[in-house]
Image: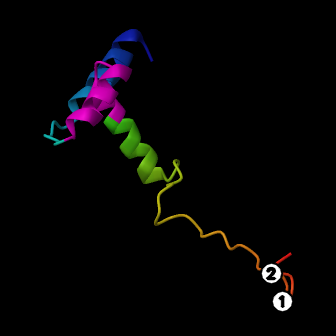
């Protein structure tokens, strides 16, 4: 593979992208813009990770409730 082939492959990947409009919370966009000047790249990486299941979800619906053990009967007021 020569340099011209590499350039053509890179151009092909760029042309395979589709532009879409996404509505984001303005505060979220501000946080993303502190990381990069290309928010679309951050969003793309996040979606890829989410689809692969790379990032474990940590919200109220995915947490396993922690059961607290109860003291044996008769030891309640020690």
**Residue 13 visible to the viewer:** no
Q: At 27% from the left edge and 27% from the top edge, which residue is drawn?
A: 30
> How many other residues sit within 10 Å of disc 2, few (<14), some (14-19) or many (≥20)?
few
- Does the stretch in magenta take in 29? yes
Q: Position of residue 31 (x, y in %)?
A: 33, 28
| Residue at x 33% of width, y 15% of height | 7
Above or below, comparing residue 46 to residue 75 in the picture: above
In this orientation, which residue lies closer to the viewer: 29 or 72?
Answer: 72
Q: For numbered disc 2, what is the local secondary structure? A: loop
Residue at x-position 47% and y-position 51%? 52
Helix, strand or loop for the magenta stretch, by majority: helix
Furthest residue in direction bottom, as rendered:
73
* Nearer to us in this view, 62 or 7: 62
Which residue lies at the image location 59% right of the left edge and 68% below the top edge? Answer: 64
- Nearer to us of marks 2 and 1 is 2
Relative to 12, residue 4 above or below: above
Q: Are marks 2 and 1 in contact (CB under 8 Å)?
A: yes
Residue 20: x and y in percent read: 15, 40
**Residue 72 shown left or right of residue 62 in the figure:** right
* Residue 25 at x, y percent in the picture: 22, 40
Which residue matches tag 1?
A: 73
Per the rendered image, the range of residues in magenta is: 24-42
| Quadrant occupied by the N terminus | top left
The secondary element bearing badge 1 is classed as: loop
What x and y, as percent, mark residue 13? 30, 30
Q: If the image is split into quadrants, where does the C terminus sit?
A: bottom right
The residue sitting at the left extreme is 21
Q: Is residue 18 left or right of residue 31?
A: left
- Residue 76 is labelled as 2
Work out whether residue 33 can be spotted. yes
Few, some or many residues within 10 Å of mark 1 (<14, 14–19, 20+)? few
Q: Is residue 14 magenta?
A: no
């Amino acid at each position: 593979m020569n340099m011209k082939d590499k350039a053509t492959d890179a151009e092909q990947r760029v042309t395979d992208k589709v532009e879409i409009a996404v509505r984001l919370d303005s505060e979220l966009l501000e946080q993303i813009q502190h990381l990069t000047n290309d928010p679309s790249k951050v969003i793309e990486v996040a979606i890829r990770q989410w689809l692969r299941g790379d990032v474990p979800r940590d919200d109220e619906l995915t947490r396993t409730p922690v059961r607290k053990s109860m003291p044996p009967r008769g030891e309640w007021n020690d």
